[in-house]
């Protein structure tokens, strides 16, 4: 064994002096080619006529109040396929890495690693010729204590007073919910996760209330972010209406969420506002099957359950016989369905445009897995960054406005007739689009709340 190489365990502490990061825990992974550093609020800029990038990092795991603002010279931009299968464009920097008593320059990509467990990943390119890894060991070069971290980062810990914001949802471990909580805390707000199933209401004309876990009254929130899964729409929207009755600002209203969940009504509403959709039919009797198929241009066609989400309950019928079988099978279950023309030229691709407060803040193209026609990430689809056309942006903004949604995931398909709207989602997921674009979309949602009032005092004055 060469004596001049450093022996590391699977986890080690290191530092980046040029970035102002005195200690960060790294996952040492020889299976990964490139090193990656957790970063949010990533933004390129010019410095002395050269390309640089600025970004923020929470270097301590599970600590969102410690924030380091970093700058580094930009080396490259690359498309990287993450371990979760997302294709994302990442900024690449070079900086000095310190491990133990050794220092050398490495190349790193910047990406949001909130779902990965470690703020830093040390890949084999940075280790080549210098390091040997013993995967059964950890912290061979020493452990950094909690007290040491407090001393190292004492000037970076800032506690701000802000709004009291609740995330009304079902799963606190879901990536999207964790990111929203983190984004709010990073912007100085007091964030609370409110489990929908643990809330209950007192209906009273003079003093409506929401109680939580053993009788605690939720009576001092400034804003609520509803993240309601389809299976609990009725109760989640009832809670949202109750918060509205208590004069709490809700990022998406109960009425907007309710109508967005009704696929038939939402399509009628969108058409009324001049938004183009694929030709669509709806019927309530198997006797109408033949004419229903002709109505949308014949086979192949798409059959959708009105209550389906994330690509579930969506079937491609490639022949008329298959379409008849699927439609009649759904009807025998008394299920409400839509039939829709199949846009063959889309080639298994669609666009997801994320709209916040009337602006498109991010966009990705989703591509279906081999042998699949649904491009949903949950169905194995992959995401890549695209630049939407002005028409596509216009459709997305118009659709969100028509549905009265401040936050919306708008799905669009490119056809020979131009862009067509597929669906508007009132609780769009963040993982795929944040991972692909490196944009702090959760932060944009918090900013949309902040825009509704200048300060906490002003807000309370407006709502009392």
Image (spheres, grey):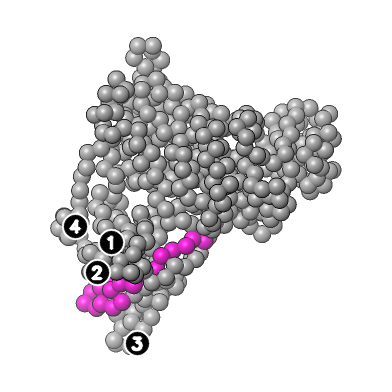
Q: Which residue is mark 1?
A: 70
Q: Residue furthest bottom?
A: 2
Q: Residue furthest front?
A: 49
Mark 2 or mark 3: whose residue is earlier in sequence? 3
On the image, the x and y values in percent for residue 374 come to: 65, 50
Of circles 2 and 3, which is in front?
2
- State the CA–CA distance, disc 2 to disc 1: 9 Å
Q: Is residue 327 above or below residue 103?
A: above
- 31 horizontally vs 308: left or right: left
Quadrant location of residue 176? top left
**Residue at x-position 41% and y-position 65%:** 91
Indicate yes or no whether the magenta region holds residue 403: no
- 397 horizontally vs 131: left or right: right
First to last magenta residue range: 87-105
Q: Which residue is mark 2?
A: 18
- 398 horizontally vs 94: left or right: right
- State the CA–CA distance, disc 3 to disc 4: 38 Å
Q: Are marks 3 and 4 in contact (CB under 8 Å)?
A: no
- State the CA–CA distance, disc 2 to disc 3: 32 Å
Mark 2 or mark 1: whose residue is earlier in sequence? 2
**Residue at x-position 29% and y-position 28%:** 459
Of circles 1 and 3, which is in front?
1
Q: Are marks 1 and 3 in contact (CB under 8 Å)?
A: no
Indicate yes or no whether the magenta region holds residue 94: yes
Quadrant location of residue 202? top left
Q: Which residue is mark 4?
A: 153
- Tag 3's secondary structure? loop
Q: Which residue is mark 3?
A: 1
Q: Main secondary structure of the magenta part?
A: strand
């Amino acid at each position: 064994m060469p004596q001049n190489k450093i022996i590391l365990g699977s986890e080690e502490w290191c530092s980046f002096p040029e970035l102002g990061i005195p200690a960060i825990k790294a996952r040492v992974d020889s299976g990964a080619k490139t090193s990656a550093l957790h970063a949010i609020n990533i933004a390129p800029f010019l410095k002395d006529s050269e390309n640089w990038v600025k970004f923020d990092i929470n270097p301590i795991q599970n600590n969102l109040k410690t924030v380091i603002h970093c700058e580094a010279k930009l080396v490259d931009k690359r498309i990287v396929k993450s371990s979760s299968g997302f294709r994302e464009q990442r900024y690449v920097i070079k900086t000095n890495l310190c491990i133990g008593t050794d220092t050398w320059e490495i190349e790193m990509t910047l990406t949001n690693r909130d779902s990965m467990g470690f703020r830093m990943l040390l890949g084999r390119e940075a280790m080549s010729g210098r390091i040997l890894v013993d995967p059964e060991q950890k912290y061979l070069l020493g452990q950094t204590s909690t007290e040491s971290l407090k001393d190292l980062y004492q000037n970076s810990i800032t506690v701000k007073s802000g709004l009291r914001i609740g995330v009304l949802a079902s799963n606190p471990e879901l990536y999207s919910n964790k990111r929203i909580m983190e984004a709010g805390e990073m912007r100085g707000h007091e964030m609370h996760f409110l489990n929908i199933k643990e809330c209950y209401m007192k209906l009273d004309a003079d003093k409506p209330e929401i109680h939580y876990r053993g009788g605690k009254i939720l009576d001092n929130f400034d804003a609520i972010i509803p993240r309601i899964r389809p299976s609990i729409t009725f109760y989640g929207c009832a809670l949202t209406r109750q918060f509205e009755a208590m004069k709490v600002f809700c990022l998406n209203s109960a009425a907007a969420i309710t109508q967005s969940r009704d696929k038939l009504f939402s399509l009628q509403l969108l058409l009324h506002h001049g938004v183009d959709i694929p030709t669509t039919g709806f019927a309530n009797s198997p006797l109408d099957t033949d004419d229903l198929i002709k109505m949308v241009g014949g086979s192949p066609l798409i059959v959708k359950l009105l209550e389906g989400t994330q690509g579930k309950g969506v079937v491609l019928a490639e022949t008329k016989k298959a379409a008849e079988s699927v439609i009649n099978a759904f009807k025998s279950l008394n299920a409400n369905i839509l039939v829709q023309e199949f846009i063959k030229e889309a080639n298994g691709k669609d666009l997801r445009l994320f709209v916040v407060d009337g602006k498109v803040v991010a966009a990705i193209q989703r591509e279906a897995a081999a042998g699949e026609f649904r491009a949903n990430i949950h169905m194995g689809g992959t995401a890549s960054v695209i630049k939407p056309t002005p028409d596509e942006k216009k459709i997305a903004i118009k659709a969100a406005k028509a549905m009265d949604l401040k936050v919306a995931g708008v799905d669009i398909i490119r056809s020979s007739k131009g862009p067509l709207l597929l669906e508007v989602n009132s609780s769009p997921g963040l993982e795929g689009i944040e991972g692909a674009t490196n944009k702090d979309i959760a932060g944009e949602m918090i900013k949309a709340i902040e825009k509704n009032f200048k300060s906490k005092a002003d807000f309370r004055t407006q709502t009392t």
